Amino acid sequence: MNKPESFFQVLNNLEEPFFVLDDNLNIVNISPNAKTILNIDKEVKGLNDIFDESNINKLKKSCSIVKNIQKTNFHVHIHQQKILLKSSLINLDGKPHDLILIKDNHLFESELKLTNCIFKISEASHYVDNLDELYSIIHKILSRVVYTKNFYIAIVDNKNDVIHFPYFIDENDPKPNSRKISNGLTEYVCKTGESILVNPEQNDSFIKNKKMNINGSKSIDWLGVPLKNTLNETFGALVVQSYDKNIRFTEKDQNILEFVSHQIAMAIKRKMDRQEIERKAYYDQTTGLTNKLLFNDRLEQSMHDAKRHNTRTAILFLDLDNFKYVNDTMGHSAGDKLLKIVSKRLKASLRKTDTIARWGGDEFTVILPKIKNTNDIRTLCKRILNEDLTNVVVDNKELRITASIGIAIYPEDGLDIETLTKNADTAMYKAKDSGKNQYKFFKPLMNKEITERFSNESNLFKAIEKQEFLLLFQPQIDLKTNEITGFESLVRWNSPEKGILPPYQFIPIAEETDLIIPLGEWILRETCKQNKIWYEKGHRLTCAVNISAKQFLKYNLADIVKNILNETGLDPKFLELELTETILMRDIEKTIRVLKRLKEMGVKISIDDFGTGYSSLSYLKQFPIDTLKIDQSFISSINNDLADDNLTIANIVIDLGHKLGLKVIAEGVETEKQVEFLKKYACDKIQGYLISEPVNEIEFNLLLK
Ligand code: C2E
Ligand code: CA
Ligand code: CA
């Protein structure tokens, strides 16, 4: 660029306020806009025609031509206003000059705000999970650059000729339902792909001429901009309104919205496409319900949660009794309509946390997490059969729909997805066999046998008396000495009908019915008794007893422990209570109180399944604990390659425990490799099948030898 005049011309056309200095800091050109901003109306020759001394000094120190650098920015002050100058070296007529662009501070800041706004939107589109959240974040971000008290986003579905309002915040109107595309202002923006600002001055004529309808309350200013995809097709609109005659939108607001709408459109489109892909992969196209794939996923999650929190999850298998008839006589489309209606009604009957899926054909499956008792399931099934399926009208024909439902419950009816669904399916077939239109529980073990057996405390005491419960002992060894230093006591129920049952089949029920209190007391007493016997024989063992949430939170655990220690004569230091993080975190103050009392008695405390719950480190420090028990899932994940084991959870926990002055024990140790690892990281003790499975008293005696 060596024709100065044409260069200045171009810059002038860009409306950028600027002036140009030569290497003696003489002003060779100043644009009209610069004069306006700087408030000068005379001819300008030198810097002192524009600036005061302090600014001139600043310039002499800072500008590119003085510093001999390509580009630099600095501020000057004019009439107490901070103004940004962007100075860059340019070549004019073969000589270096300094082009200085004047950035009005106010302008500069709003530009910065806009850039920031765009950046924030783009960022949100990456971290936000769902569209609703994205919309509200967009709203929040936009509120920093325009007035958004009344703000909505409309999305058009041209295929179905419908316009949706997924996000709608308005001081006068409620969120409208989706509607057929009509002659509204929003539709105008969507159809033409143009932004419009409708104000009272033009509102009436515009609306009259274009034959528009006004939907909702009439605003003073209505400003809508289109949302366009990358093919420049409009798929929606973004609208702000003002009902306040003191708050008016201007062309500037329109420009701002247009400017950011591109980024917003991209963010929304990206999320919409994602959702569409997920919908296709995980949802049934006819009914919109979860499909088998997602159902299995959810069931797995739900089983996992149930295991962790000792709750139960029920699954229902529902099959329409006469669907085939409808399909055959009224056609497939009628069949599809029926499925849609049934899906909708079933869904409405469920809680938010429940999952309903279309399993295939006319089969539906439902997950009911955290069920409290079987009566709730009965009530639900009755409602489904007697209310949800009646009065179904398809193609003007009233149909009598019935269904058969089978129910299976985790964990008693199966520990994996396959078994559970298979068992629910079996139960469903039983319901069909027994005459349809009814529900059946699979193997009514939980609800008949166990609950009935334990239905009152005296029955449970009878079971204890009849010695139907027994304890197994699993040794714990010290990794330094390789000696057995203690054991965990684990309960079993020897059911007359079912044989030996593991704890997950009856502990949850005992907890739910509060029968865990007498049962837990029995376990504690028997364990202490047994440990005292071993003590007399010369063994110094710490016995670990699992304490359930109910025992810890609802009852005077400390008193019970004290009595039992007195009764059995066991030295308190040989008793360790195992509590989970979840139990401890539930009521911090109470936890500290109870733990302190136990501590004063000399009883030890261990945190069971450590790492699977949610404990806060700061509380952990406050609790008087002795041992962290690393959950077996972290032990089983110790991989064989000891080279890159540095970041496994196991060694983090070991480290953490030691820093807190605690002993660390690893449970579920099954391989020599794991032992090697644990030794390397100085874990104190181990427990697991590698040493021994939980065994009875006689076998434990052999281990002690
Ligand atoms: P927990 O306290 O985490 O007990 C450890 C479980 O891991 C025991 O299962 C034990 O048999 C098993 N186990 C031990 N070593 C290994 C190993 O090397 N590999 C694998 N895969 N497993 C190992 P169990 O006896 O079925 O107990 C399950 C859960 O039932 C216990 O988990 C505990 O939460 C509860 N429980 C057991 N006994 C009692 C009790 O007396 N009172 C209460 N409230 N809960 C109990
Ligand atoms: Ca335990
Ligand atoms: Ca455990």
Image (tube, grey):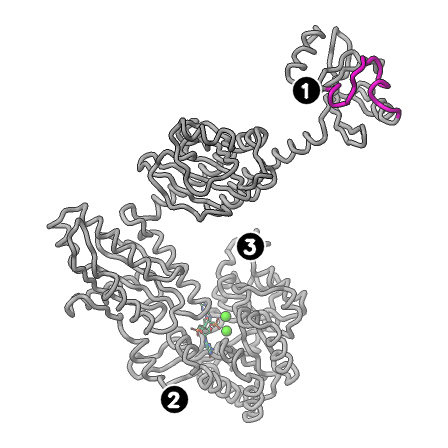
| Residue 327 vertical placement versus 450 (above, below) | above
Please provide percent x and percent y for residue 64: 78, 21
Residue 608 in percent (x, y) is at: 53, 71
- N-terminal of the pair, mark 2 or mark 3, is 2
- 526 within the magenta span: no
Magenta segment: does it hold 36?
Answer: yes
State yes or no: Cβ of the residue under disc 1 lies below 8 Å from any atom of ligand 3.
no
CB under 8 Å between discs 2 and 3? no
Residue 402 can be seen in this image: yes
Q: CA distance from mark 1 to mark 3?
A: 64 Å
**Residue at image coords 31%, 60%:** 366
Residue 60 placed where, x, y %?
85, 22
Earlier sequence position, callout 1 versus callout 2: 1
How dense is the environment of label 2, judged by Cα within 10 Å: few (below 14), some, or many (20 and up)?
A: few
What residue sits 51% from the left and 46% below the top? Answer: 136
Residue displayed at 49% across by 37% down: 239
Quick check: marks 1 and 2 in contact, CB under 8 Å? Answer: no
Which label was assigned to residue 642? 3
Tell whether 249 sits left or right of 218: right
Amino acid under label 2? Answer: Gln
Residue labelled with disc 2? 467
Magenta range = 34-53
